[in-house]
Image (cartoon, helix red, strand yellow):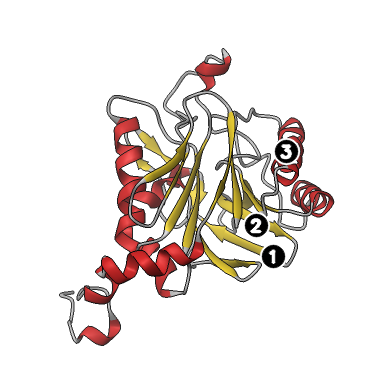
Amino acid sequence: MLIALSQLTTGPDPAKNLDLIEEQARRAADAGARVVVLPEAAMACFGTKLAPLAEPLDGPWANRVREIAEAAGIVVVAGMFTPAEDGRVTNTLLATGPGVEATYDKIHLYDAFGFAESKGVAPGTRVVTIDVEGVRLGLATCYDVRFPELFRAHADAGAVGTLLPASWGAGPGKREQWELLVRARALDATVWVAAVDQADPAASGITVSGTAPTGIGHSMLVGPDGTVRESLGAEPGLIVAELDVPEVDRVREKTSVLANRRLGREDAGITYPK
């Protein structure tokens, strides 16, 4: 199955960002991709006041993404913000298109490296997978990549890949961590990982300030053996590449980390300290 990874830089205006999403969806569909994955915060970049922009899942922004996916005949996965009951927002992935309608709310919030996402964002609680033409894929967002149990949960649910939109924070060593973590999660769970970051704003001549994570680029498609198959630099770009579903079984026959694990398996007879 062909999959597209769309690395772009979104701004604070949700309407203008929809134009970017439409362009990328058309390009991906024209290239034969069945799924196009856009970054976290595709609705509006971090550093923007999110609460006034947040919309429900049946609001105009999400409905426009649905129209774009339907017109292009492709599944679109894009990050948006929805209102939470406590006055915060939820960092939500919308997955919509032919045969697919699902949402994932980011479970692990980025309270690290001087940024406190939880001040304005409420955490999700559900592990979510989608089926695209018979291929099961898990959904995760950015900081989730530091928590291998979510990716293993995708594998346990039958997923052969995880779609990972992100808006990665810049800083010393952060690119190295991004690349290491994405490859490690693919190998941990023996799944494909499509990691799609916001492009580095500086690569497009955009100056940012503050600690908000606005992306560093370097999106990549990583195979279930942890090797990078396709990657981008810091600037905006589009990857269209083959996600080889049978390769997952071949790798799992050789690297039996899921079958051999003891912790985290309900049938292992191991109790955890409280």
Q: Residues within 10 Å of mark 3 (few under 14, many from 20)?
A: some
> Which residue is rendered at x = 62% and y = 30% of the image?
10
- Distance, label 1 to label 3, CA atoms, is 20 Å
Residue that badge 1 annotates: 100
The x and y percentages for residue 205 are 56, 12
Labels 3 and 2: the sequence-earlier one: 3
Q: Can residue 78 be spotted in the picture? A: no
Q: Nearer the viewer, residue 196 or 150?
A: 196
Q: Check disc 1 and report its element: helix, strand or loop.
A: strand
Labels 2 and 1: the sequence-earlier one: 2
- The answer to whether mark 2 and mark 1 are in CB contact below 8 A is yes
* 202 vs 88: above or below: above
Q: Nearer the viewer, residue 196 or 215?
A: 196
The x and y percentages for residue 229 are 43, 43
Labels 1 and 3: the sequence-earlier one: 3
> Which residue is rendered at x = 30% and y = 59% of the image?
188
* 26 vs 245: above or below: above
- The answer to whether mark 1 and mark 3 are in CB contact below 8 A is no
Residue that badge 3 annotates: 27
Which mark is nearer the camera, 1 or 3?
A: 3
The x and y percentages for residue 55 are 71, 49
Amino acid residing under circle 3: Arg
The x and y percentages for residue 233 are 47, 26
Q: Check disc 2 and report its element: helix, strand or loop.
A: strand
Amino acid residing under circle 1: Val
> Which residue is rendered at x = 56% and y = 46% of the image?
241
Amino acid residing under circle 2: Ala
- Classify residue 77 as left or right of residue 98: left
Q: Which mark is residue 95?
A: 2
Q: Residues within 10 Å of mark 2 (few under 14, many from 20)?
A: many
